[in-house]
Image (cartoon, coloured by chain):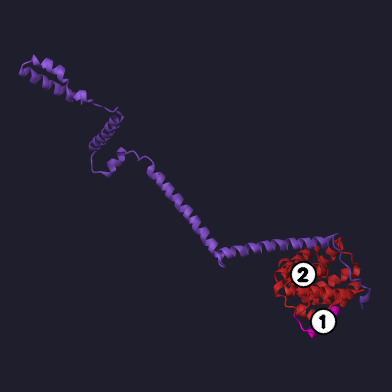
Amino acid sequence: MHSKEEKQVTEEQSITYFILEKKDTEKAFHLMLQAYQKPIYYYIRRMVLAHEDADDICQITFIKAWKNLDRFRGESKVSTWLHRIAYNETMTFLSKSKKTNHLDMDEAKFGISNSLQGDPLFTGEEIHVLLHTALATLPEKQKAVFIMRYFEEKPYEEIAVITGTSQGALKASYHHAVNKIESYVKSQSKFS
Amino acid sequence: MINWNDISKKEFDVPAGYFDQLTSSIEKRIEEEVFTTQRTKILEKRFGKDGKVRRIIWSALASAAVVVLGWFILKMNQLQSPTQMVEFDTVLDSTALNEEEVILLLSEEDMAIFFEEEIAELPAFEISENDIKPNRDQDSQSLDSLTSEEILEYLIESDIDFLEMQ
């Protein structure tokens, strides 16, 4: 009986084998889609919050992956490579929407809190609303690091490959993010 | 301090059957991509790598050819249309003739055209050999009884009649 981790390793290996050997790229892509669509979707969803936006970016991510499948050299894991595409696509989306929305920090926080509470697909509790509102106050890259480290429990080594940042800088960034979130949550509990 | 361990890591849900739908949407879009790529490859094979530019040039040339052909047909139709009527004022302006001379000129022109048309409408006039050559037997019988002066007079009258008939 294989454990979950062993199964993932086998899956990852077979996808990598199919891609690198160019045996059956369609099958490889289908396996990749089945294996990674959920983690990729949830990463994007936590970054952009709205389901419709997450859906769009997720589709773009996998289509880009398909188009660039021949560029995958096997230097990192398939999931890391895929996550890097998702990270870049999400950053592009956020920087575009920042340019069009022009909201100040208070308006943004108020909007996030309201939209989360009114979203039927948001199943979180009050602390999740506070957590995501606090995340909105962070720089986009710091927010991405926090999501990958806290929610997805990715090792710094992998986050470094995805974001193209050194592990030391990532550790510092995560530490700052945690402090900012804690101080935000604390301030909200104090004044609410 | 936040007790991070108490915070659940499942705060978002998705619509029912969403991931199946996502898979089929992505695979459908990829099929379209593959179709487009194959189509592009075929076009590139046919027109070369710069096929796009070449296709644009060809379509521009074809459009220009259509325009030129249209213009040519229009000009041909204009050439075949009846000539404009000569008007009095136009002739008067364009020549050094006085009014009377212009009237005379135009009348002559009109008469010439009128005669040409009249002649064209006349039935073909055919002269048989008998009309030209008199019946020798009949004539010889009647001429026998005539004097030389009467014969000469008869012949002159015949000629005049013949000329008048023509």
Please, which residue is most extreme toward the top here?
B145
Query: Is A178 covered by the magenta stretch?
Result: yes
User: Label 1 belongs to which residue?
Assistant: A156
For residue A78, side relative to residue B117 (left or right)? right
Distance from the alpha carbon under mark 1 to that under mark 2: 27 Å
Disc 2 marks a residue whose amino acid type is Ala
User: Are there few (<14), some (14-19), or many (20+) residues within 10 Å of tag 2?
Assistant: many
Residue A19: quarter of image: bottom right
Give the purple chain's letter. Answer: B
User: Label 2 belongs to which residue?
Assistant: A28
Give the red chain's letter. Answer: A
Tag 1, which secondary structure? Answer: helix
Query: Is B106 covered by the magenta stretch?
Result: no
Identify the main secondary structure in magenta. Answer: helix
Q: Position of residue B7 (x, y in %)?
A: 92, 72
- Which stretch did the figure color magenta? A164-179
> Residue, x 22% and y 37% (percent of image)?
B101
- In the image, residue B43 sits, relative to residue B159, either above or below, namely below
> Which numbered disc, 1 or 2, marks the residue closer to the eye?
2
In this rendered view, identify the residue nearer to me: B105 or B114.
Answer: B114
Residue B52 visible at all: no
Disc 1 marks a residue whose amino acid type is Tyr
Residue B166: quarter of image: top left
Residue A156 visible at all: yes
- In the image, residue B80 sits, relative to residue A48, either above or below, namely above
Q: Earlier in the sequence, mark 1 or mark 2?
A: 2
Residue B50: quarter of image: bottom right
- In the image, residue B126 sits, relative to residue A11, either above or below, namely above
> Residue, x 86% and y 66% (percent of image)?
B12
Q: Position of residue A150 (x, y in %)?
A: 86, 76
Q: Are marks 1 and 2 on the same chain?
A: yes
